[in-house]
Structure formats: structure tokens, C-alpha cells
């Protein structure tokens, strides 16, 4: 298995414009994400950028970046476009899609995501979950919940569904973390398919894969990393960087 880590990023985020270049402790956020991915040491790392400014920032920091069509509709489209340029010989059979708004993601989480595909031959896609941070997560539509059939060791599970809806009962509620590991053929099949009914209903693109019959397995992380989606998240990240 030969993974490559790709980080999609674009400037036109609606809730926090220009966020890939937001300064966090003296570094652009996208550079912090890049450094965490490099620390995982599971394969080469590159940024799939929708804007020249992102490419410049990454290259200035010594990283690899590919400029992709800014009109591509999703991060998965962006990483597939970057992959075609970076690896036309198909040397990498696994693609790790790391969101560009997780400046403190634990490198071990990326390793665990890749290991799922190595350990479970039936998995088309790997992802990551973490325990709920508080009971309020259960009814928060901004917190995506993963419904899993857990393995006996409690460290991974097969995804049955993902939802924004409230989950009830005494069992753990797993927060979904937006990190994906794709077998290359699964990424290509996923991108070739049209948005599915459940995907459109929940606004969750991973449901397209489940409706296609793909198997998604999730590794369990100790906690969800900080994700920067709005100005208050950015302030929290800046405070974390100052510790």
C-alpha cells in the first residue's frame, strides 16, 4: 500500500473568506495542516489548491502544491485533479484526503486512517470518528454523527449511516471527522457518480458512497481536532497556538 496525502484548499469559504492563509501563531493555517500531515510520515503530501495565493504560501514554506481549476465543485474533485498531475503513473493506490482547516490534527490520526485500509481488505473508504464532546453534540445539526457497527476492540467500526439528526439512547455518539482514505479506484468511482438522494437530503457527500454500496470503515480517535470554520473557531485556534 502506497498512500499519498492530499489537502484540498480554496480561498472562497463563505463563513471565513481566505481562511487557508489565516495567520495562526505566525504560520498560515494551510502550512500548519501541511506540517501535521508531513509529520505522519505515511507518504508524500501536497496541497490541491484552488487559488494561486495558496500555492505561493505552500511553496514558500517548502511544500508541494498543485493549482487546480477554481470552479471544481468539491474537495474530492480537487484532489482527483491534483492526483492526475502528481501521479499519472498510478504509483499511489491510496489517497488520504485531509481537510485544510484542521491546523492541529494529530499525525497519528492520519496513520490510523491509512491503517484501516491495510487491516480491512473489504473497506473501500476509511475515515475517522471521535467521541462526542458534550451531550449537546447529539442534537447539534452542525455535528455530523456516524452510526457504526463496532468491532469487538472498540477501536474501529463499519459505517452504517451518517446524519445531522439527533441520536438517542445510551450508546456512544461518534462525531465524524472529515478525514478520508480512499482506495484509488473507489475515489474515481465516487467522483464519477452523481450526488445521491441521501447525500442531497443530509448535505453529506459520504452518503453517496454508501448508496453506491461502498464499505466505509472508521478508526476511533481520542478526540476531534480543532476545525476552523468561522471567526470564533479561528480565535480558538490562535489561542491554542499560543499555549
Image: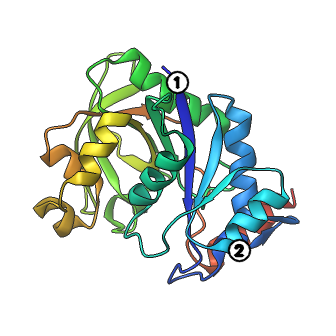
Q: In which quarter of the image is the C terminus?
A: bottom right
Seen from the viewer's position, the closer of residues 15 and 9 is: 9
Question: Which numbered disc flags the more N-terminal residue, 1 or 2?
Answer: 1
Residue named by callout 2: 53
Q: Tell whether 33 sits left or right of 194.
A: right
Residue 56 position, x and y percent, is 76, 67
**Quarter-wise, where is residue 170 in the image?**
top left
Residue 38 position, x and y percent, is 72, 39
Q: Tell whether 69 sits left or right of 164.
A: right
The residue at 28%/53% (across/down) is 191
Residue 71 position, x and y percent, is 43, 76
Seen from the viewer's position, the closer of residues 108 and 13 is: 13
Callout 1: SS: loop
**Circle number at residue 119:** none
The residue at 51%/52% (across/down) is 82
Residue named by callout 1: 2
Instruction: Give the colour scheme of this rendering.
Output: rainbow
Amino acid at each position: 500500500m502506497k498512500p499519498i496525502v492530499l489537502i484540498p484548499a480554496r480561498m472562497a469559504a463563505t463563513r471565513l473568506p481566505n481562511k487557508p492563509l489565516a495567520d495562526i501563531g505566525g504560520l498560515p493555517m494551510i502550512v500548519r495542516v501541511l506540517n501535521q500531515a508531513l509529520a505522519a510520515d505515511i507518504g508524500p503530501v501536497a496541497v490541491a489548491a484552488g487559488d494561486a495565493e495558496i500555492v505561493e504560501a505552500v511553496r514558500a514554506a517548502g511544500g508541494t502544491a498543485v493549482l487546480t481549476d477554481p470552479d471544481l465543485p468539491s474537495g474530492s474533485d480537487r484532489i482527483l485533479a491534483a492526483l492526475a498531475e502528481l501521479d499519472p503513473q498510478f504509483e499511489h493506490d491510496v489517497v488520504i484526503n485531509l481537510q485544510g482547516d484542521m491546523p492541529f490534527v494529530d499525525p497519528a490520526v492520519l496513520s490510523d486512517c491509512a491503517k484501516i485500509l491495510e487491516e480491512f481488505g473489504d473497506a473501500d473508504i476509511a475515515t475517522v470518528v471521535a467521541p462526542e464532546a458534550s451531550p449537546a453534540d447529539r442534537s447539534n445539526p452542525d455535528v455530523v454523527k456516524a452510526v457504526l457497527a463496532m468491532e469487538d476492540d472498540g477501536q474501529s467500526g463499519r459505517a452504517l449511516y451518517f446524519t445531522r439528526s439527533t441520536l438517542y439512547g445510551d450508546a456512544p455518539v461518534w462525531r465524524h471527522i472529515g478525514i478520508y482514505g480512499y482506495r484509488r479506484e473507489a475515489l474515481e468511482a465516487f467522483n464519477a457518480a452523481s450526488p445521491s438522494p441521501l447525500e442531497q437530503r443530509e448535505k453529506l457527500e459520504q452518503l453517496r458512497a454508501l448508496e453506491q454500496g461502498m464499505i466505509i470503515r472508521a478508526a476511533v480517535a481520542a478526540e476531534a481536532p480543532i476545525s476552523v470554520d468561522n471567526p470564533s473557531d479561528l480565535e480558538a485556534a490562535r489561542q491554542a497556538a499560543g499555549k
